[in-house]
Amino acid sequence: MNEHVLIIDDDEHFARLLSVYLSRAGFRTTVAPDGIQGQMAANRTQPDVILMDYRMPAASGVTVAGRLRRSSVTGYIPIVMLTGHKTHQLESTAQEAGVVAVLSKNDLSEEQLLRTLRAAIDGGTGGSADLDELFPSHVDG
């Protein structure tokens, strides 16, 4: 495997836990503490997938996702968003910004996280993986 995951989260403890878990699962990880540093890390490291928090200082995850998606350097990188307050409106807004999946931190299982990251990597921004089939709550309606 050895795919690279960029973790962007201002909760240092949570980001470190994600990094350790994903490293043990075979991923390489880079951690950025906010959206601005996350954008710079994405430009520099070209990860296979970005795992990003919704609520961060300076810029929300949706704002950062939109910037990453519009960039010719990072626009192809799939983005998975994490939030402690998942709503239909947030999912819709995140999808409009180019996020491929939104996961709730409150009931996130290790299996769901790994399946989502693998599907995002395999499908990129519109390839073979069908995230709507894997995660029906991801679909509007």
Image: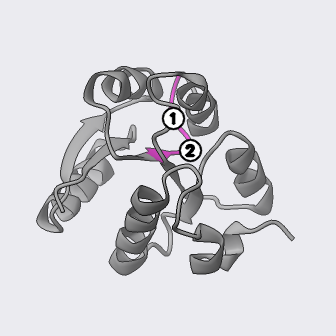
Q: CA distance from mark 2 to mark 1?
A: 6 Å
Q: Which residue is mark 2?
A: 54
Check whether the beta carbons of the residues at disc 2 and disc 1 lie within 8 A of each other: yes
- The stretch of residues the image draws in magenta is 52-58
Residue 36, by quadrant, is top left
| Circle 1: residue type | Met
**Quarter in which the C terminus is drawn:** bottom right
Residues 65 and 133: in front is: 133
Q: Residue at x 43, y 76 (%)?
A: 112
Q: Residue 44, percent across and down?
A: 28, 22
Residue 18 location in percent, x, y? 27, 57
Residue 134 is tagged as none
**Quadrant location, the N terminus:** bottom left
Q: Secondary structure at mark 2?
A: loop
Instruction: Determine whether 45 is above or below 13 in the image.
Output: above
Main SS of residues in magenta: loop
Check disc 1 and report its element: helix, strand or loop: loop
Task: Judge whether 9 appears above or below 91 on screen.
Answer: above
Residue positioned most to the front: 128
Left of 17 or right of it: where is 53?
Answer: right
| The quadrant where residue 25 appears | bottom left
Circle 2 residues within 10 Å: few <14, some 14–19, many ≥20? many
Residue 56's tag is 1
Q: Is residue 28 left or right of residue 66?
A: left
From the top left corner, tell me how far across and down residue 123 is, in percent. Answer: 49, 59
Rendered residue at 35%/70% (across/down): 114
Q: Please give the name of the residue rendered at 52% of the width and 68% of the height, measured from the top-left corner.
A: 129
